Image (spheres, rainbow, N blue to C red):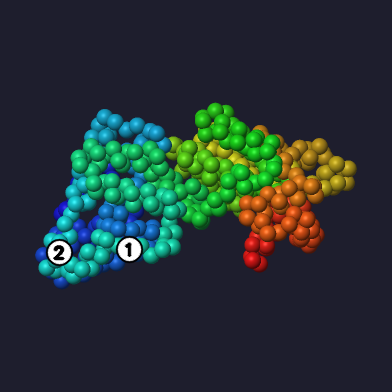
Amino acid sequence: MINCIDKFIIYRNFDNGDVLEILVQALSDTDSEKVQKDVYTAANRLIELAGVYGFNGNLWQNYLTLLIVSNENVFSKTCEINGIADGSLKQLAIHDFLIFSELFRYDFKELAGICDISVLKMLLDYKRVEGSGTAYNKRIRDRICHLSKQLDESLSINEFTENIIDFYKTFGVGRFGLNKAFRLVEGEIVPISNIAHVKLDDIIGYEDAKKQLIENTEAFINGKPANNCLLYGDAGTGKSSSIKAILNQYYENGLRMIEIYKHQFKQINSVIEQIKNRNYKFILYMDDLSFEDFETDYKYLKAVIEGGLEKKPANVLIYATSNRRHLIKESFSDSDGWGGDIHKTDTVQEKLSLAARFGVSIFFTAPDKKQFQVIVKELAKRAELDDISESELMLMANRWELTHGGFSGRTARQFIDYLLGTR
Protein backbone atom coordinates (compact mmCIF):
# COMPACT_ATOMS: atom_id res chain seq x y z
CA MET A 1 0.00 0.00 0.00
CA ILE A 2 2.98 2.27 0.56
CA ASN A 3 3.45 4.76 -2.31
CA CYS A 4 0.68 3.01 -4.27
CA ILE A 5 -0.73 6.35 -5.46
CA ASP A 6 2.42 7.02 -7.47
CA LYS A 7 1.95 3.72 -9.31
CA PHE A 8 -1.41 4.60 -10.85
CA ILE A 9 -1.18 5.19 -14.59
CA ILE A 10 -4.74 6.02 -15.73
CA TYR A 11 -6.52 6.66 -12.42
CA ARG A 12 -5.11 9.89 -11.03
CA ASN A 13 -6.32 13.28 -9.79
CA PHE A 14 -9.08 11.79 -7.67
CA ASP A 15 -11.91 13.88 -6.28
CA ASN A 16 -11.92 13.23 -2.51
CA GLY A 17 -8.50 11.62 -2.90
CA ASP A 18 -7.32 13.10 0.40
CA VAL A 19 -8.34 10.03 2.45
CA LEU A 20 -6.17 7.75 0.33
CA GLU A 21 -3.25 10.16 0.53
CA ILE A 22 -3.55 10.46 4.33
CA LEU A 23 -3.65 6.68 4.87
CA VAL A 24 -0.80 5.98 2.48
CA GLN A 25 1.28 8.60 4.26
CA ALA A 26 0.34 7.16 7.67
CA LEU A 27 1.35 3.61 6.76
CA SER A 28 4.73 4.77 5.53
CA ASP A 29 5.44 6.64 8.77
CA THR A 30 7.40 5.22 11.71
CA ASP A 31 6.05 7.63 14.31
CA SER A 32 3.14 5.76 15.98
CA GLU A 33 1.56 8.95 17.33
CA LYS A 34 1.50 10.51 13.87
CA VAL A 35 0.15 7.29 12.39
CA GLN A 36 -2.68 7.32 14.92
CA LYS A 37 -3.45 10.96 14.21
CA ASP A 38 -3.52 10.40 10.44
CA VAL A 39 -5.68 7.27 10.70
CA TYR A 40 -8.25 9.06 12.84
CA THR A 41 -8.21 12.03 10.45
CA ALA A 42 -8.92 9.62 7.58
CA ALA A 43 -11.68 8.01 9.68
CA ASN A 44 -13.27 11.39 10.17
CA ARG A 45 -13.26 12.03 6.40
CA LEU A 46 -14.76 8.58 5.72
CA ILE A 47 -17.63 9.28 8.11
CA GLU A 48 -18.20 12.69 6.54
CA LEU A 49 -18.31 11.11 3.08
CA ALA A 50 -20.70 8.44 4.37
CA GLY A 51 -23.06 11.23 5.42
CA VAL A 52 -22.85 12.98 2.07
CA TYR A 53 -23.14 9.88 -0.11
CA GLY A 54 -25.28 7.70 2.18
CA PHE A 55 -22.82 4.82 2.33
CA ASN A 56 -23.41 1.71 4.39
CA GLY A 57 -21.26 -1.25 5.40
CA ASN A 58 -17.53 -1.15 4.65
CA LEU A 59 -16.76 2.57 4.35
CA TRP A 60 -13.20 1.95 3.17
CA GLN A 61 -14.35 -0.16 0.24
CA ASN A 62 -17.25 2.19 -0.49
CA TYR A 63 -14.76 5.03 -0.61
CA LEU A 64 -12.47 3.20 -3.05
CA THR A 65 -15.48 2.39 -5.21
CA LEU A 66 -16.43 6.08 -5.20
CA LEU A 67 -12.95 6.94 -6.49
CA ILE A 68 -13.39 4.44 -9.33
CA VAL A 69 -16.90 5.45 -10.43
CA SER A 70 -16.27 9.19 -10.26
CA ASN A 71 -12.85 9.35 -11.94
CA GLU A 72 -13.22 10.67 -15.50
CA ASN A 73 -10.28 9.39 -17.52
CA VAL A 74 -9.65 8.06 -21.01
CA PHE A 75 -10.61 4.49 -20.01
CA SER A 76 -13.76 5.24 -18.00
CA LYS A 77 -15.09 7.73 -20.57
CA THR A 78 -14.49 5.22 -23.37
CA CYS A 79 -16.52 2.60 -21.51
CA GLU A 80 -19.46 4.83 -20.56
CA ILE A 81 -22.85 4.12 -22.11
CA ASN A 82 -22.10 0.94 -24.08
CA GLY A 83 -18.61 1.99 -25.13
CA ILE A 84 -15.82 -0.56 -25.49
CA ALA A 85 -12.28 -0.13 -24.24
CA ASP A 86 -9.92 -2.94 -25.20
CA GLY A 87 -6.34 -3.58 -26.22
CA SER A 88 -3.54 -1.66 -24.53
CA LEU A 89 -5.94 0.74 -22.82
CA LYS A 90 -7.68 -2.10 -21.02
CA GLN A 91 -4.37 -3.65 -19.99
CA LEU A 92 -3.20 -0.35 -18.52
CA ALA A 93 -6.48 -0.07 -16.62
CA ILE A 94 -5.97 -3.60 -15.26
CA HIS A 95 -2.60 -2.44 -13.95
CA ASP A 96 -4.42 0.20 -11.91
CA PHE A 97 -7.17 -2.22 -10.86
CA LEU A 98 -4.54 -4.55 -9.39
CA ILE A 99 -3.60 -1.68 -7.07
CA PHE A 100 -7.25 -1.03 -6.22
CA SER A 101 -7.75 -4.74 -5.57
CA GLU A 102 -4.86 -4.73 -3.12
CA LEU A 103 -6.30 -1.66 -1.40
CA PHE A 104 -9.70 -3.35 -1.15
CA ARG A 105 -8.18 -6.20 0.79
CA TYR A 106 -5.99 -4.20 3.12
CA ASP A 107 -6.18 -5.70 6.62
CA PHE A 108 -6.73 -2.88 9.10
CA LYS A 109 -5.94 -5.29 11.94
CA GLU A 110 -2.31 -4.39 11.27
CA LEU A 111 -3.09 -1.08 12.99
CA ALA A 112 -4.42 -2.79 16.14
CA GLY A 113 -1.37 -1.92 18.19
CA ILE A 114 -1.59 1.76 17.28
CA CYS A 115 -5.28 2.60 16.93
CA ASP A 116 -8.46 1.58 18.72
CA ILE A 117 -9.45 -1.55 16.76
CA SER A 118 -13.11 -1.20 17.81
CA VAL A 119 -13.27 2.15 16.01
CA LEU A 120 -11.78 0.63 12.86
CA LYS A 121 -14.27 -2.25 13.01
CA MET A 122 -17.17 0.21 13.09
CA LEU A 123 -15.81 1.87 9.95
CA LEU A 124 -15.75 -1.52 8.24
CA ASP A 125 -19.33 -2.32 9.28
CA TYR A 126 -20.95 1.11 9.34
CA LYS A 127 -24.68 1.50 9.95
CA ARG A 128 -26.09 4.27 7.80
CA VAL A 129 -28.35 6.94 9.29
CA GLU A 130 -31.67 6.81 7.44
CA GLY A 131 -32.18 9.83 5.25
CA SER A 132 -28.47 10.50 4.84
CA GLY A 133 -26.95 10.90 1.41
CA THR A 134 -27.60 14.02 -0.63
CA ALA A 135 -25.04 13.58 -3.42
CA TYR A 136 -26.84 10.88 -5.42
CA ASN A 137 -30.35 9.57 -5.69
CA LYS A 138 -31.08 6.39 -3.72
CA ARG A 139 -30.83 4.10 -6.72
CA ILE A 140 -27.34 5.24 -7.68
CA ARG A 141 -26.19 5.24 -4.04
CA ASP A 142 -27.32 1.64 -3.59
CA ARG A 143 -25.72 0.63 -6.90
CA ILE A 144 -22.36 2.03 -5.77
CA CYS A 145 -22.62 0.08 -2.51
CA HIS A 146 -23.55 -3.03 -4.52
CA LEU A 147 -20.54 -2.55 -6.80
CA SER A 148 -18.36 -2.22 -3.70
CA LYS A 149 -19.47 -5.70 -2.57
CA GLN A 150 -18.98 -7.10 -6.06
CA LEU A 151 -15.41 -5.83 -6.21
CA ASP A 152 -14.66 -7.21 -2.77
CA GLU A 153 -15.99 -10.63 -3.77
CA SER A 154 -14.26 -10.73 -7.17
CA LEU A 155 -12.28 -13.95 -7.50
CA SER A 156 -9.89 -12.65 -10.16
CA ILE A 157 -8.60 -9.38 -11.55
CA ASN A 158 -10.54 -10.06 -14.76
CA GLU A 159 -13.79 -10.32 -12.78
CA PHE A 160 -12.83 -7.17 -10.86
CA THR A 161 -12.28 -5.35 -14.16
CA GLU A 162 -15.46 -6.60 -15.82
CA ASN A 163 -17.56 -5.49 -12.85
CA ILE A 164 -16.20 -1.96 -13.24
CA ILE A 165 -16.67 -1.93 -17.03
CA ASP A 166 -20.24 -3.17 -16.62
CA PHE A 167 -20.95 -0.32 -14.20
CA TYR A 168 -19.54 2.25 -16.63
CA LYS A 169 -21.65 0.84 -19.46
CA THR A 170 -24.83 0.91 -17.38
CA PHE A 171 -24.47 4.11 -15.38
CA GLY A 172 -21.58 6.03 -16.91
CA VAL A 173 -18.82 7.78 -14.98
CA GLY A 174 -18.34 10.94 -12.97
CA ARG A 175 -20.88 13.68 -12.46
CA PHE A 176 -22.56 13.22 -15.86
CA GLY A 177 -22.80 9.46 -15.46
CA LEU A 178 -24.13 9.37 -11.91
CA ASN A 179 -26.61 12.26 -12.02
CA LYS A 180 -29.66 13.06 -14.13
CA ALA A 181 -29.79 16.79 -13.98
CA PHE A 182 -27.54 19.79 -13.47
CA ARG A 183 -27.60 23.55 -13.06
CA LEU A 184 -25.04 26.31 -13.57
CA VAL A 185 -23.52 27.79 -10.42
CA GLU A 186 -20.97 30.53 -11.10
CA GLY A 187 -20.17 28.93 -14.44
CA GLU A 188 -19.72 25.42 -13.06
CA ILE A 189 -22.02 22.53 -14.03
CA VAL A 190 -23.31 21.27 -10.66
CA PRO A 191 -25.43 18.11 -10.13
CA ILE A 192 -29.01 18.32 -8.86
CA SER A 193 -29.58 15.27 -6.68
CA ASN A 194 -33.25 15.74 -5.77
CA ILE A 195 -35.34 15.42 -8.93
CA ALA A 196 -39.15 15.25 -9.00
CA HIS A 197 -40.08 11.67 -9.96
CA VAL A 198 -42.87 12.73 -12.30
CA LYS A 199 -43.86 10.40 -15.14
CA LEU A 200 -45.61 11.20 -18.39
CA ASP A 201 -48.60 9.14 -17.22
CA ASP A 202 -48.93 11.52 -14.27
CA ILE A 203 -49.92 14.25 -16.74
CA ILE A 204 -53.54 13.57 -17.55
CA GLY A 205 -54.60 14.39 -21.10
CA TYR A 206 -52.41 16.20 -23.66
CA GLU A 207 -51.77 12.91 -25.47
CA ASP A 208 -50.89 14.54 -28.81
CA ALA A 209 -48.49 16.97 -27.11
CA LYS A 210 -46.78 14.17 -25.18
CA LYS A 211 -46.54 12.08 -28.36
CA GLN A 212 -44.73 14.88 -30.21
CA LEU A 213 -42.32 15.31 -27.31
CA ILE A 214 -41.65 11.56 -27.07
CA GLU A 215 -41.06 11.18 -30.81
CA ASN A 216 -38.58 14.05 -30.95
CA THR A 217 -36.74 12.87 -27.84
CA GLU A 218 -36.51 9.25 -29.01
CA ALA A 219 -35.11 10.40 -32.35
CA PHE A 220 -32.49 12.39 -30.41
CA ILE A 221 -31.64 9.45 -28.13
CA ASN A 222 -31.27 7.11 -31.12
CA GLY A 223 -28.90 9.42 -32.97
CA LYS A 224 -31.44 10.50 -35.59
CA PRO A 225 -32.09 14.11 -36.64
CA ALA A 226 -34.11 15.90 -33.93
CA ASN A 227 -35.26 19.44 -33.27
CA ASN A 228 -35.06 21.94 -30.47
CA CYS A 229 -38.44 22.00 -28.70
CA LEU A 230 -40.59 24.88 -27.47
CA LEU A 231 -43.48 23.98 -25.19
CA TYR A 232 -45.78 26.98 -24.96
CA GLY A 233 -49.27 27.74 -23.74
CA ASP A 234 -51.32 28.47 -20.65
CA ALA A 235 -49.86 28.37 -17.16
CA GLY A 236 -50.21 25.18 -15.12
CA THR A 237 -50.86 22.89 -18.08
CA GLY A 238 -47.90 20.55 -17.59
CA LYS A 239 -45.19 21.99 -19.83
CA SER A 240 -42.39 21.85 -17.25
CA SER A 241 -43.65 18.56 -15.81
CA SER A 242 -43.54 16.99 -19.28
CA ILE A 243 -39.88 17.84 -19.70
CA LYS A 244 -39.02 16.51 -16.23
CA ALA A 245 -40.91 13.32 -17.09
CA ILE A 246 -38.95 12.97 -20.33
CA LEU A 247 -35.72 13.11 -18.33
CA ASN A 248 -36.91 10.43 -15.92
CA GLN A 249 -38.09 8.20 -18.75
CA TYR A 250 -34.92 8.34 -20.86
CA TYR A 251 -32.22 8.75 -18.22
CA GLU A 252 -31.15 5.11 -18.56
CA ASN A 253 -30.76 5.67 -22.31
CA GLY A 254 -28.08 8.25 -21.64
CA LEU A 255 -30.22 11.40 -21.48
CA ARG A 256 -29.03 14.21 -19.20
CA MET A 257 -30.43 17.69 -18.59
CA ILE A 258 -28.81 21.01 -17.69
CA GLU A 259 -31.06 23.81 -16.45
CA ILE A 260 -30.01 27.25 -17.68
CA TYR A 261 -31.57 30.60 -16.83
CA LYS A 262 -31.64 33.47 -19.28
CA HIS A 263 -29.10 35.53 -17.32
CA GLN A 264 -26.66 32.65 -17.97
CA PHE A 265 -26.97 32.59 -21.76
CA LYS A 266 -23.49 34.05 -22.19
CA GLN A 267 -22.15 30.84 -20.62
CA ILE A 268 -23.89 28.42 -22.99
CA ASN A 269 -20.90 28.08 -25.31
CA SER A 270 -18.72 27.16 -22.34
CA VAL A 271 -21.28 24.52 -21.26
CA ILE A 272 -21.42 23.02 -24.75
CA GLU A 273 -17.63 22.87 -24.86
CA GLN A 274 -17.67 20.68 -21.72
CA ILE A 275 -20.35 18.25 -22.89
CA LYS A 276 -19.96 17.94 -26.65
CA ASN A 277 -17.56 14.98 -26.58
CA ARG A 278 -19.33 12.90 -23.91
CA ASN A 279 -21.30 9.76 -24.71
CA TYR A 280 -24.54 11.22 -23.39
CA LYS A 281 -27.38 13.19 -24.93
CA PHE A 282 -27.81 16.57 -23.26
CA ILE A 283 -30.91 18.74 -23.17
CA LEU A 284 -30.33 22.37 -22.21
CA TYR A 285 -33.54 23.14 -20.33
CA MET A 286 -34.88 26.70 -20.14
CA ASP A 287 -38.03 27.06 -18.07
CA ASP A 288 -40.52 29.92 -18.37
CA LEU A 289 -38.54 31.54 -21.17
CA SER A 290 -39.67 35.01 -22.23
CA PHE A 291 -38.17 38.42 -22.86
CA GLU A 292 -39.31 42.01 -22.49
CA ASP A 293 -38.65 44.60 -25.19
CA PHE A 294 -35.58 45.94 -23.43
CA GLU A 295 -33.94 42.55 -22.83
CA THR A 296 -31.37 41.49 -25.43
CA ASP A 297 -29.94 38.29 -23.93
CA TYR A 298 -32.03 36.30 -26.41
CA LYS A 299 -29.49 37.25 -29.09
CA TYR A 300 -26.95 34.92 -27.42
CA LEU A 301 -29.47 32.10 -27.55
CA LYS A 302 -30.21 32.75 -31.23
CA ALA A 303 -26.53 32.44 -32.07
CA VAL A 304 -26.18 29.19 -30.15
CA ILE A 305 -29.26 27.56 -31.65
CA GLU A 306 -28.54 28.58 -35.22
CA GLY A 307 -26.39 31.29 -36.63
CA GLY A 308 -22.95 30.94 -35.09
CA LEU A 309 -19.95 29.71 -37.05
CA GLU A 310 -19.53 26.57 -34.92
CA LYS A 311 -22.06 23.83 -35.58
CA LYS A 312 -24.10 22.77 -32.56
CA PRO A 313 -23.00 19.27 -31.43
CA ALA A 314 -25.24 16.34 -32.31
CA ASN A 315 -25.57 15.38 -28.64
CA VAL A 316 -27.09 18.71 -27.55
CA LEU A 317 -30.67 19.99 -27.89
CA ILE A 318 -32.56 22.88 -26.32
CA TYR A 319 -35.98 22.38 -24.71
CA ALA A 320 -37.78 25.47 -23.45
CA THR A 321 -41.14 26.29 -21.91
CA SER A 322 -42.95 29.58 -22.18
CA ASN A 323 -46.36 31.15 -21.78
CA ARG A 324 -45.61 33.18 -24.93
CA ARG A 325 -45.70 31.64 -28.39
CA HIS A 326 -43.09 34.04 -29.77
CA LEU A 327 -41.06 34.39 -26.54
CA ILE A 328 -40.41 38.12 -26.97
CA LYS A 329 -43.03 40.64 -25.87
CA GLU A 330 -45.00 42.03 -28.77
CA SER A 331 -47.10 45.18 -28.89
CA PHE A 332 -49.60 46.80 -31.26
CA SER A 333 -46.92 49.29 -32.26
CA ASP A 334 -45.01 46.43 -33.91
CA SER A 335 -47.77 46.12 -36.48
CA ASP A 336 -49.21 49.61 -36.81
CA GLY A 337 -45.93 51.43 -37.35
CA TRP A 338 -46.34 53.85 -34.43
CA GLY A 339 -43.53 52.43 -32.35
CA GLY A 340 -40.89 54.73 -33.80
CA ASP A 341 -39.32 51.99 -35.93
CA ILE A 342 -39.28 52.98 -39.60
CA HIS A 343 -38.90 49.39 -40.83
CA LYS A 344 -41.66 47.75 -38.85
CA THR A 345 -41.32 44.47 -40.80
CA ASP A 346 -37.74 44.13 -39.59
CA THR A 347 -38.89 44.65 -36.02
CA VAL A 348 -41.51 41.92 -36.32
CA GLN A 349 -39.07 39.50 -37.95
CA GLU A 350 -36.50 40.10 -35.23
CA LYS A 351 -39.05 39.21 -32.56
CA LEU A 352 -40.21 36.10 -34.40
CA SER A 353 -36.74 34.83 -35.26
CA LEU A 354 -35.98 33.27 -31.87
CA ALA A 355 -39.14 31.15 -31.71
CA ALA A 356 -38.59 30.13 -35.34
CA ARG A 357 -35.32 28.48 -34.37
CA PHE A 358 -37.27 25.85 -32.40
CA GLY A 359 -38.12 23.19 -34.99
CA VAL A 360 -40.86 21.66 -32.84
CA SER A 361 -43.43 23.88 -31.11
CA ILE A 362 -45.96 22.11 -28.90
CA PHE A 363 -49.07 23.89 -27.66
CA PHE A 364 -50.47 23.21 -24.18
CA THR A 365 -53.90 24.77 -23.82
CA ALA A 366 -55.86 25.15 -20.60
CA PRO A 367 -58.58 22.52 -20.16
CA ASP A 368 -62.23 23.47 -20.32
CA LYS A 369 -64.56 22.73 -17.42
CA LYS A 370 -65.30 19.18 -18.57
CA GLN A 371 -61.62 18.35 -19.08
CA PHE A 372 -60.78 19.88 -15.72
CA GLN A 373 -63.32 17.64 -14.03
CA VAL A 374 -61.86 14.58 -15.78
CA ILE A 375 -58.41 15.51 -14.43
CA VAL A 376 -59.77 16.00 -10.90
CA LYS A 377 -61.58 12.65 -10.93
CA GLU A 378 -58.50 10.79 -12.16
CA LEU A 379 -56.23 12.42 -9.59
CA ALA A 380 -58.77 11.66 -6.83
CA LYS A 381 -58.86 8.03 -7.96
CA ARG A 382 -55.06 7.77 -7.86
CA ALA A 383 -55.06 9.39 -4.40
CA GLU A 384 -57.69 6.84 -3.25
CA LEU A 385 -60.19 9.47 -2.14
CA ASP A 386 -62.98 6.94 -2.50
CA ASP A 387 -65.00 8.24 0.44
CA ILE A 388 -65.97 11.44 -1.42
CA SER A 389 -68.87 11.12 -3.81
CA GLU A 390 -68.37 12.30 -7.38
CA SER A 391 -70.97 15.05 -7.05
CA GLU A 392 -69.40 16.37 -3.85
CA LEU A 393 -65.91 16.17 -5.37
CA MET A 394 -66.99 18.17 -8.44
CA LEU A 395 -68.73 20.78 -6.30
CA MET A 396 -65.63 21.32 -4.16
CA ALA A 397 -63.37 21.33 -7.23
CA ASN A 398 -65.45 24.01 -8.94
CA ARG A 399 -65.35 26.17 -5.84
CA TRP A 400 -61.60 25.68 -5.58
CA GLU A 401 -60.79 26.72 -9.14
CA LEU A 402 -62.75 29.98 -8.79
CA THR A 403 -60.22 31.25 -6.24
CA HIS A 404 -57.10 29.34 -7.31
CA GLY A 405 -56.23 30.25 -10.87
CA GLY A 406 -58.99 28.75 -12.98
CA PHE A 407 -59.03 25.52 -14.98
CA SER A 408 -55.60 23.87 -15.21
CA GLY A 409 -53.84 20.66 -14.31
CA ARG A 410 -51.88 22.53 -11.65
CA THR A 411 -55.08 23.79 -10.02
CA ALA A 412 -56.47 20.24 -10.00
CA ARG A 413 -53.28 18.91 -8.43
CA GLN A 414 -53.32 21.61 -5.76
CA PHE A 415 -56.96 20.84 -4.99
CA ILE A 416 -56.25 17.14 -4.46
CA ASP A 417 -53.20 17.98 -2.32
CA TYR A 418 -55.49 20.21 -0.24
CA LEU A 419 -57.92 17.34 0.29
CA LEU A 420 -55.11 14.98 1.25
CA GLY A 421 -53.65 17.56 3.61
CA THR A 422 -56.93 17.95 5.50
CA ARG A 423 -57.43 14.24 6.07
Q: Secondary structure at mark 1?
A: loop
Q: Which residue is mark 1?
A: 127
**On the image, which quarter does residue 91 sit in?**
top left
Residue 235 drawn at (x, y percent): 72, 51
Q: Is tag 2's residue or tag 1's residue first in the polypeptide sequence?
A: 2
- Disc 1 marks a residue whose amino acid type is Lys
User: Which mark is on residue 157?
Assistant: none
239 and 42: which is toward the camera? 239
Residue 319 drawn at (x, y percent): 61, 42
Q: Secondary structure at mark 2?
A: helix
Residue 274 drawn at (x, y percent): 46, 43
Which residue shows up at 54% across the image and 44% down it?
247
Which residue shows up at 34% across the image and 52% down it?
145
Badge 1, how many Cα within 10 Å: few under 14, some, many 20+?
A: some
Residue 35, compared with residue 15, is above or below; it is below
275 and 129: which is toward the camera? 129
Q: Which residue is mark 2?
A: 111
Residue 389 drawn at (x, y percent): 73, 57
150 on left or right of 373: left
- Disc 2 marks a residue whose amino acid type is Leu
